[in-house]
Image: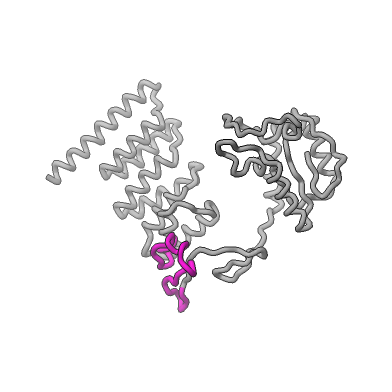
Amino acid sequence: AEASSADAKQAAVQRGEWLLESAAKLDGGKPQESAVTSMVRVCCACGAQERAMKLVAEAQAKGVKPRLRTLSAVLLQAAEAGDRITCDRVWAQLPSLGLEPQDSEFAIMLRTFRDDPDRQYAILRQLHEDLPMPSDPPLIEEIGRVFGVEGTAVLRSTEPPHAAGREENGRRWRLGWTTLDEEGRCALSGHRLQAMDASPEEEVALERMVLRLAGDSGRSKPFRRFRRWLEERPPFDIVVDGANVGFNSQNREGGLFQYSQIDAVVQKLRETGSRVLLVLHPKWLREDADRSVIKRRKRKLDQISVQEPLGSSAEEDEAEEI
């Protein structure tokens, strides 16, 4: 029976490869990414991880960039087979392909290296950098297991919402859900969060991104005028995206753009003594503005319009509007 099953799996892989090759010929020799992904999944289901990896490499050589879902299938199958070498190979390939692991991939890696705390800590450090706010329940549970706690999600509804974990180097881990006070102090650890300022290099990169979003190549008079307007004023502490605040929690039947929400946010920030820059499209300042929530197809790079007039800059209140 086992031999028959192995033969059937081998036949499935061979048949799949024939179909993939035939489809590629119809497209000038370049396979479709979706077809490659399907074939990779067939290989993984049949236990042919090495063939799956070769398929990915062959597709790359033909100009097909694999997606995360393609390599995720290999990663999952390798993890279930206990093949840590293949897991590490796939994981190491992701950055070079411009692919960023998500919740499910991090969960797979943490599960694969459960008996290797140092490797898990390295994965968690990467998680902290790449995905600082994980939300997928399986990943949350795997994070808890790293520190010797089962049922992490359930802790949210307990009092206190934390539990003692495993012991390490004479001390015991404590894991759970926490809150931060107005000073940024963690209720669980007692530590205070530190502000993370952007480096000069990051500020330069951010400015380039903003210029690209604005569609500016240095020739737009309105945008140059906007930049001069900013340079003539003292630095702002906080920038408020008026449209996002105005539409917050309004994605429902009868939802409307709420000026009161914007005003409440600005007033609260003013109370802290901060200089507030409120950015709001001129259309929301018209008396006949349509405040209804209308779902439109998003346009690329629509965040800043260089065609709209900037309006008056005479207002010198604590909150300035553009």
Note whether residue 209 is visible. Answer: no
Q: Is residue 90 above or below residue 312?
A: below
Query: Which one is nearer the viewer's eye here, 209 or 175?
Result: 175
Quarter of the view holding residue 109: bottom left
Task: Single out the residue that lies furthest toward the right.
Answer: 314
Callout count = 0
Instruction: Tell me where the magenta segment starts and ends, as one range.
Output: 143-172
| x 39%, y 64%: residue | 150
Position of residue 138 in the picture relative to residue 205 (left or right): left
Residue drawn at the location 12% of the way across and 45% of the way down: 1
Q: Is residue 167 magenta?
A: yes
Q: Is residue 265 above or below residue 213?
A: below
Residue found at x 37% / y 34%: 36
Going by the image, does 296 lie left or right of 64?
A: right
**Can you name the residue that lies furthest to the front here?**
254
| x, y percent for residue 18 | 28, 28
Left or right of 130 on screen, residue 216: right
Q: Is 118 drawn above or below residue 206 in the view shown?
A: below
